[in-house]
Amino acid sequence: MTQKLLFIVNPKAGKGKIKPKLADVIDLFNKYGYDVTVYMTQSQGDAKRVAALRYSEFDLIVCSGGDGTLSEVVGGLIDCSGPKPAIGYIPMGTTNDFARTLGIPTTNILKAADLAVRGPAYPCDVGRFNDRSFTYTAAFGAFSDVSYATPQSTKSILGHAAYVLQGLESMPSIKSYLCTVTIGNRTITDWFIFGAISNSESIGGFKGLCGMDVELSDGQFEVLLIKHPNTLAELHGIARAILTHDMTAKGIVACRTASIEVACEEPLAWTLDGEYGGTVNEAKISVDKKAIRYVTRMGKRG
């Protein structure tokens, strides 16, 4: 019996690199016995809408785009009832953080497409941010409140944060936020310049930012909070700790958790999977364990 595949394509991702390879990718899918339906996204949020509307018609969904496109597809499926198809991914974004974590080729379109239809599918955790979902990271601070007018500023947001942490920007440029963070029975009230709740080995192209091994289906996300440094020496100390993965250093809070709440008196801007996630005073973040199946070569993470 022929299997059905929904191919959701963001044609603008990666400056349209998928377009010259589109026929080859579809031909590959056909050769593996898939009846392919192609949908080209028309606007932001379209991938989520189509995935939610048509998921029950297909045995597999493959999306081509950046991590934001993948996040939209996951968001479309997460609350749907009944069996959900696995998700294959052809990464076309700027940093492709989650693709790297999943072990998906990021420089060869046809190899990624081949994995999408031949690789095994494994259940992975999905994050909840208030009433929204995210696949691999929710972050605030240290450039998270800059303008999102250009795609590059959005995709590089956490890369810029790493740049700041290495002391390459002056102290006055770093804004801090007075936050009350609740992790289980632990409550911390302090000034923070950066926070990330993640389930990825790479964030903004910065590998190992949280300094912990990552398991994609353990029901926990890795948390990194960085307190406001009072001196340039403290900032450099934090930068060294991040670069050497010393999560015990002064000014750093690092742990694993299934849920966390971050409350701030002033509106706090967040990024979700590298995209602007809105501005809120209170964020309740939790994990849906093994909620979505991804096609990935990282079998040990299933």
Image: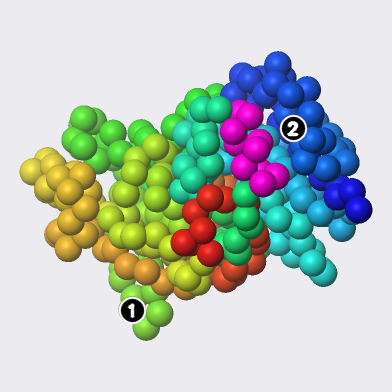
* Name of the residue lying farthest toward the bottom: 185
Query: Which residue is at a point 49% across and 54% down the rendered structure image?
Result: 298
Percent across and percent down for residue 254 are 29, 63
Total residue callouts: 2
Q: Is residue 264 visible?
A: no
Q: Is residue 188 visible?
A: yes
Percent across and percent down for residue 23 are 78, 22
Q: Is 100 on the left or on the right of 19, as rendered?
A: left
Query: Which residue is at a point 49% across and 45% down the rendered structure image?
Result: 103
Q: Residues within 10 Å of mark 1 (few under 14, many from 20)?
A: few
| Residue placed most toward the observer, 126 or 129 | 126
Q: Amino acid at mark 1?
A: Arg
Q: Is 193 on the left or on the right of 283, as rendered?
A: left
Return the mark for residue 186.
Answer: 1
- The span picked out in magenta is 109-118
Q: Magenta region, mostly helix, strand or loop?
A: helix
| Residue placed most toward the observer, 287 or 261 | 287
Q: Amino acid at mark 2?
A: Leu
| Residue placed most toward the observer, 254 or 278 | 254
User: Mark 2 highlights which residue?
Assistant: 28
* Name of the residue lying farthest toward the top: 20
Which of the two marks, 1 or 2, is nearer to us in this view?
2
